[in-house]
Amino acid sequence: MSEFDVIVVGAGPAGASAAIKLASAKVNVLLVDRADPPGSKNVSGGVLWGDSLTQVAPDWEKGPVERYVEAKGVSFLTKDSRISLDFRSKKFGEYKSGYTVLRTKFDAWLAKKAKDSGVMLVSGVTVDKIAMKDGKAVGVEQGGETITSDAVILAEGANSRIAYDSGLKRKPTDRNTALGVKEIIKLPEKTITERFGLTSPKMGFASEFVLGFLEGGVRAGGFLYTNKESLSIGAVISMAELRKNNKTYSFNVIEQFKEHPFVAPLLEGGRVEEYSAHLVPEGGISADSLNGNGYMIAGDAAGFTFSNGLVLQGMNYAIVSGIVAAESFLEKKEKGIQAGANFANYTENLSKTFVMKDMMNFKGIDKLTWSKYVHQTLPSIAEEAMLNMFSENGQPKKHLYKILTKSMSSHEESKLGMAMELLKMLRRM
Amino acid sequence: MGLKIVVMIKQVPDSQEVVIDPVTFTLNRSAARNVINPADENAIEAALRIKDKLPDTHITVITMGPPFAETALLDAMARGVDDGLLVSDRAFAGADTYPTGLTLAATITKIGDVDMIFAGEESTDSSTGHVGPGVAEFLGIEQASYTSNSWIEDGYVYAERELEDGIETVKMKPPSLITVVTNANVPRNATLRMKIDAIRKGIKTWTLADIELKPEWVGLKGSPTVVKSMRTMNEKKREGKKFKAGEMDKFVDELVSKGILKL
């Protein structure tokens, strides 16, 4: 007989959600995290979209959240300009947006929730690998000892060392990995509310940026989120970009972003309180198989993140995949589970949720989001068009269509080619 | 019957994470995670090394503190300590080093038949170094402070103290108390197996009633220390002028003109 019903590796949103779900069904769960306190090595941009957490922690909105996103932006930055879409709506009450969160607080809160619901939580120890016997996962190995379980839920995050070492996942390629660098900048609550034009100190702003202006044409995305008393600002740079020429450094990218003439004023007077870096899964599902004999892979470890340039999401996918993994275990348990059973029902159950649907529908979107078209061509056309539209130079005014086509013709690509790209983009996004 | 060892530990905020509040100039401990006082980790390791040689040794780790100090005890147990005992009571709040020593001494008396007591040289959050030696005095036993190595031989406790001009080896008759310097050894890591076992075993908790001390002897009431005032030293603003290489003449002139250097 196994020592635990389930061992969950990694106390991030995926692992903690799975553990809570299992423990509340009286399942004997061990949740292991390498950091102490649990989750303190975890990093994310900082918006938890949706309300999937309600399923395992109904009171989470009163917990470790910072501000509710009432203002969502997308900006294209050129060297001298910022072209933004800035959407603010009172309807973000009935239409769920998300909360900004600080992961050190948030993850510790969720881990405690797991502990309180009966999970055995062990932190500060790194699992070496999954213990395999006759091709079945039968627990985890650490320090030469095996802790047995009927199932393992692997939620170890983007840098999935255990999955690699246990042969469950191929080493990441440049295409499915990006590097995120992030700073937390301290500012008074009142300053943030006023500076970002928010309706109350409980309300927040979240924006994604396309950083088309970077030195050497480096392609990177940026984000800026408001917390209660700090800003989360960061950049995500594709590995391919970093590898392409050895002159690109992630810290230069975030510095250039922070120093942009229309970003710098937003950070004015702030003090960097924290900085971090983390791998970001890109390009969809990265595990060869999401399930196998005795194991399931959830969250970042499976590659469950979403980015189409307009939104960056990950934690909501992690939470849902964790919950579905727990449910899939419970389903099997009801029928009398054997250690090392195959959890094909996990992939099946997951395919009924937005997690898998998004992964399938938006497969290959990374090619678009990292394209030169999105990073340089489109922003520079837009900049030129805006300048023509919004400036006044005593000349007769032109129609918008004329302005656009003129701006487009100053580029090497054909107008038709660009129109096709735009159409493709709209369809894919 | 094997040796009976008690290790006294304290849970402290991680000194690397304690920040000074820029407005009130007080220490903000809430941002810092709680860890075992570093020297106490070395004390635990020193005790475990004796158990390595004499496996039927029984080690109890004790701490006086709030309920959340449980994590420090579990951490020690996960490294190989047999039992964890938390001495916790509202009456202990506000204790200075005197009643803290008394409380721990009473706890050790209650445990009974202890051969050796280990403690860290001092804690990072108050740095007095009082408590270990204080406990030895309350118990009326021999002690060696600031030790870097210790062992048992022919029924005696030996301890090495690193002094300025050499190493002093002290021979004591048990029961005796040893305080261990920071970095005296490399504390071992806990494994997942041991962490699980520690959590399953759990700790014991004693209150004031268990150690049979009068309420007026412990906590704030039993503390002779009176804090008259406290001040924060302000950093002196310095000019911080920079000179480039090759500007030595200018540099010397500046020093002379300010009267710092006399020719």
Image (cartoon, coloured by chain):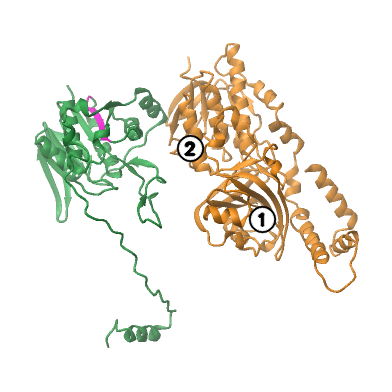
Chain colours: A orange, B green
Type of amino acid under label 2 = Ala
A283 left or right of A124 in image? right
Q: Say above or below: B76 vs A345.
A: below
Q: Which residue is drawn at 55% across and 30% down?
A: A57
Of the pair B149 and B249, the residue shown nearer to us: B249
Query: Which residue is found at the position 36% from the left and 87% from the top?
Result: B253
What residue appears at the point 29 percent right and 36 percent down from the top-left corner? B65
Mark 1 = which residue? A244
Q: Residue A26 carries which label?
A: none
Query: Mark 2–mark 1 contact, CB under 8 Å?
Result: no
Calculate the distance from the C-alpha at mark 2 to the C-alpha at mark 1: 38 Å
Q: Point out the stretch of residues depicted in magenta.
A: B56-64
**Sequence-first tag of 2 and 1:** 2
Residue A381, given in percent of the width and then of the height, sits at: 81, 60
**Position of A344 relative to A177 (above/below):** above
Q: For numbered disc 2, what is the local secondary structure?
A: helix
Return the x and y of residue B152 as percentages of the image width and height.
16, 34
Q: Front-most of A174 and A366?
A: A366
* Residue B1 visible, this orientation: yes
Q: Of A97 and B188, which appears nearest the observer?
A: A97
Name the amino acid, label 1. Answer: Lys
Query: Image height check: is A405 above or below A157?
Result: below
Q: Quadrant of residue A399?
A: bottom right
User: Mark 1 falls on what kind of element?
Assistant: helix
Residue B61 part of the magenta-drawn span: yes
Quadrant of residue A359 within the rendered picture: top right
Which residue in the protein does label 2 denote? A108
- Left or right of residue A191, residue B58 in this image: left
